[in-house]
Amino acid sequence: MRRVAIIGASGFTGLELVKILIGHPGFEITYVATSEGETSLTALHPSLTDVFDAPVYKADAGSIAEAAELAFLALPHKASMGFAKELLEKGVKVVDLSADYRLELETYEKHYCPHEDKAHIAEAVYGLPELYREAICKTNLVANPGCYPTAALLGLLPFTRYIDERFPVFIDAKSGVSGAGKKCSHNTHFVTINENIFPYNPLVHRHQPEIAEKLRMQSGKNFDVNFVPHLIPVTRGEMIDTYLLLKEEIDPMAVLRDFYEEAPFVRLFDKPVDIKSPSGTNFCDIFAKRVGQKLYINSAIDNILRGASSQAVVNANLMCGYAEGLGIPTIAYVP
Amino acid sequence: MRRVAIIGASGFTGLELVKILIGHPGFEITYVATSEGETSLTALHPSLTDVFDAPVYKADAGSIAEAAELAFLALPHKASMGFAKELLEKGVKVVDLSADYRLELETYEKHYCPHEDKAHIAEAVYGLPELYREAICKTNLVANPGCYPTAALLGLLPFTRYIDERFPVFIDAKSGVSGAGKKCSHNTHFVTINENIFPYNPLVHRHQPEIAEKLRMQSGKNFDVNFVPHLIPVTRGEMIDTYLLLKEEIDPMAVLRDFYEEAPFVRLFDKPVDIKSPSGTNFCDIFAKRVGQKLYINSAIDNILRGASSQAVVNANLMCGYAEGLGIPTIAYVP
Amino acid sequence: MRRVAIIGASGFTGLELVKILIGHPGFEITYVATSEGETSLTALHPSLTDVFDAPVYKADAGSIAEAAELAFLALPHKASMGFAKELLEKGVKVVDLSADYRLELETYEKHYCPHEDKAHIAEAVYGLPELYREAICKTNLVANPGCYPTAALLGLLPFTRYIDERFPVFIDAKSGVSGAGKKCSHNTHFVTINENIFPYNPLVHRHQPEIAEKLRMQSGKNFDVNFVPHLIPVTRGEMIDTYLLLKEEIDPMAVLRDFYEEAPFVRLFDKPVDIKSPSGTNFCDIFAKRVGQKLYINSAIDNILRGASSQAVVNANLMCGYAEGLGIPTIAYVP
Amino acid sequence: MRRVAIIGASGFTGLELVKILIGHPGFEITYVATSEGETSLTALHPSLTDVFDAPVYKADAGSIAEAAELAFLALPHKASMGFAKELLEKGVKVVDLSADYRLELETYEKHYCPHEDKAHIAEAVYGLPELYREAICKTNLVANPGCYPTAALLGLLPFTRYIDERFPVFIDAKSGVSGAGKKCSHNTHFVTINENIFPYNPLVHRHQPEIAEKLRMQSGKNFDVNFVPHLIPVTRGEMIDTYLLLKEEIDPMAVLRDFYEEAPFVRLFDKPVDIKSPSGTNFCDIFAKRVGQKLYINSAIDNILRGASSQAVVNANLMCGYAEGLGIPTIAYVP
């Protein structure tokens, strides 16, 4: 059993990490922290009552390093890099769920803030196992992908060689409200989003450059990625609809089957997917359809599992030499 | 056209007041204010764009008195009584949607705070037209009932002479989230209440004494009112289920029909009601069923209309000599 | 007062017609029918209790012609054309909410069924007032647009001269469940669509050719329209997100303002729209944003009002010489 | 590994049985059937794709007996007793999720239909482990309780000795839509129940006599149970609010703690419970509050787990000599 720490346990992704790890046969939670501490897991999350409890400390790198050999950082961007830096120096493996190590330096600083741990950017591996499985196995620092990029990339990556990059790729995304975090705000007020749907940050969302960068890294080509996210009145789940032009008239389902032949957490469907079927699991469900040279890709994930916490544990599995699927949820929250 | 002011226009009940009054044939909105001012109605409520706009001032009693002969106060309790006092002294009629004038002094101070306008309590009329229509017509100060008391009392009042007051009256209430107001909080976060239901303040909610006091005033009897409200995952609407014991085996629907023979805004149904049918209207829908000496009363209203703003305008109609139903919404938000 | 008939009163659009017409200063409902008859409006729609009632007959063209000078047909396609034909021959004006007269013959028969009233296709006017206001004023037969085409066309029409038609137009649409009708089915079961979202009929929906045909008629150009509708877990409302390439770098908001200068039921917003703000009204809310030569158009309507019944009454207003906005709802179901 | 059969795999409780059993360390699914057969589990439930599949046969008692030593019957009442009878005669243990063996003969026939397997009624044990744990361990036939009785009884049983049975017990229940089953109907149409709440079958629901009978069996006293269920706009979960009079002024939380000292699947809370916290688990969460001699009990369960399928597997565990909690879900669907 490897000892692991969860830093940032009060939010939704923190809770999901706890839920996976308490039943995980290879990890033992030995340290739990938030930025404030002085509470307990069941106080933060009453649904854990009689199931699992642990003291919640004010996060401290020294204590983490004593208690655990791997730490999950479920913190806001910027807060994360400080801890990551210290933990790596103390020999603790890190799975960072924030944006801090996902991007190339210049892109990061343009879209987020000045980077305070430039030294470790180079060794961070982008934690999309379908793309970087081998590198993840060898690194001490995984940058866990954003939820939107996860579902968008898993839909796009199999097609990069066929896409006509002279034309834009349009991504219309829909996310449940848990993606906006636990903090109360006008947009997360029930009365605002119930019986409603609306786009936000159209064409300027920070996940747009993340998608573009990873496509370029995989294919060597620059795609013109255009991204419009929407908030929808559901708690969890995310759907990505991608529209683009191809250079040739491929069979998209055949391309997908070929690309994901050995991917345990991608499921392919011959008809449109929904967000409920992968909800509660690490699966990404994908459907695609071509008409002439136009391609429509339709992918869905659980935004706080495959888009955050279960993917983080998959990465931890790989970093620790475990099987990719060890302890990873596959049974959906259906009905 | 009577000139009216809306004080507290930023919240849900403020918006509902605006929505009713802009189409009302007898009232003209001549002054709109919030506690902060310096904005406009369409800035506060974008759904009013191209429909109706007005500058929103920082509330000031002198300006109100100049601009209007009647003011709707859609303010939190305590904030309301200050304005009401000044406005009444300046000759402005007041419909107060807060709790400040709803209760007898002692009850008010026990459940809310010290009262700062004791002088006007005596002349305040509780604005439930089915109970106090005549007094409302003659007063300058109406205390608009709470949403829960409105639906609970309309169900109970016809039966007070038949109820066995030695036994408790149990009221199980369910309210949409708009009842919790526009302010963001843990309970109004979409992720908290979506796919959920929970009671709050069971047996200690401040609407419990309001219901008991009005029952006593109407019947001269003390009922043991026990009230448990629940938050439900809908935006608007409220249902009250009341359970009690009778002294005799009456026909409850006949009692209701008799009591509400001339009430334009009470609808009686031979089967259980739902909250959607009266949604968007000033109706209170009621069904009742007796088994032996046990009585079950089932009533539903729109919590921010019959439970607040449309009832307020009905009261204003009566205070100004208009027909009770003038300009009052009756067409439901169905489907 | 013009006497009007509503044929097909049991569904959602039938109810919306009733709700608008009972308060309409220029129309009087003199005949209500369904395919089965022998009921009453309040039996079909209990929310109308104490508001408006009328006997509901089994639809019969002769009786309609006697009772009314204009008939709204809220019937399924194919059922509609039979009545329309007879009614027109008897001198009754018709607003047909079905698809039967929306398309050119060939397109109709390809996507629906053989047409049984070819004689009247030519005189049918497509009832999008922003496009065909003058022709609507003069015709006896209006083909009321589909909900998706209404919102899509109102977003696209101002831009047809600037669109690069060599590139596809991608339309990602989201509709509330009322659009699927009152009939129970797997997709409309609460458990299926609650907490969910999914596309259906991607790239083959019958509203795709309707959009393409009207764009061609207005501009003389053939656009490659690609349409993917989604079902979302809300009762009413519809959002259209359109992605396309321009030939030149226009200011999209300026183009919109120019095009809709005199349109009383189009509202323009400088930021993304939502479906709740136009809900309950005849408004179409539009926002657009350009990045380079890429254009994103974001429009929203109430699918059963602007997408069906309120637009139908606007058309009836024009056909009868009334002002376009007479009796048309503008106050949103917000909150 | 014990071999088990699931008969009635197409519905919501059938799916929940599959979800629990595929990860259960003591049971192996060896036979799956519906009334129609000729399909597969993933065809019935696409969310199981790539997780677990099995052929689905037309249910046949002989084949079940060959394939399995215990059968879960997730069938409608009446359909169940035919299979149960044959299976028991062939030596197969049965957990029946229908109502067929829950009640005494007379009560059953009054509220359901003539009984066709009277011989086995006497040996059926009511599968509420907190009440009949020992008998469940020894029987071959468990009648799995209804969802409402489960949550109502778990709240009431600790208090039967203190309740004043001269007064009624009022139960106000709220259930998610999954409780109404997978079949489409007016009440399960999204547009009917979304943004709504309504009671159904008030004071005559068939779960009322089930609750009363079990209270009598445990306590020897006749309670006057009055039951009003409501449908609420959530997929899963159930809340029971019970109101009654006590004979003495007990400390209700102390009584609960005492009664459930060794119950692994009852959780006690010092404040009101919600339906989301036990969702996805076998827990029943309970809170209670006394004011004078009035008692308010507030309990919540997942209606298709503790109210059906997970309780069924707990019963199977006990019948097969396993630990009560073996393979039973405890991690909630939160957020």
Image: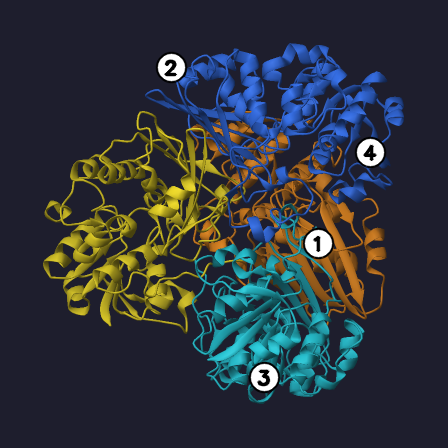
Chain colours: A yellow, B orange, C blue, D cyan
Q: Residue at x 41, y 74 (%)?
A: A50
Q: Residues within 10 Å of mark 4 (few under 14, many from 20)?
A: many
Residue C247: assigned label: 2
Task: Give the secondary structure at mark 1.
Answer: strand
Q: Is residue B197 left or right of residue C1?
A: left
Front disc: 1 or 2: 2
Whole-percent x, y for residue D293 in the image? 62, 77
Front disc: 1 or 4: 4
Residue C33: assigned label: 4
The image quadrant of residue B304 is top right
Q: Residues within 10 Å of mark 3 (few under 14, many from 20)?
A: some
Residue tagged by mark 3?
D131
Amino acid of disc 3: Leu
Residue tagged by mark 1?
B299
Q: Chain of mark 3?
A: D
Q: Residues within 10 Å of mark 1 (few under 14, many from 20)?
A: many
Q: Is residue D146 above or below residue C317?
A: below
Q: Chain of mark 1?
A: B
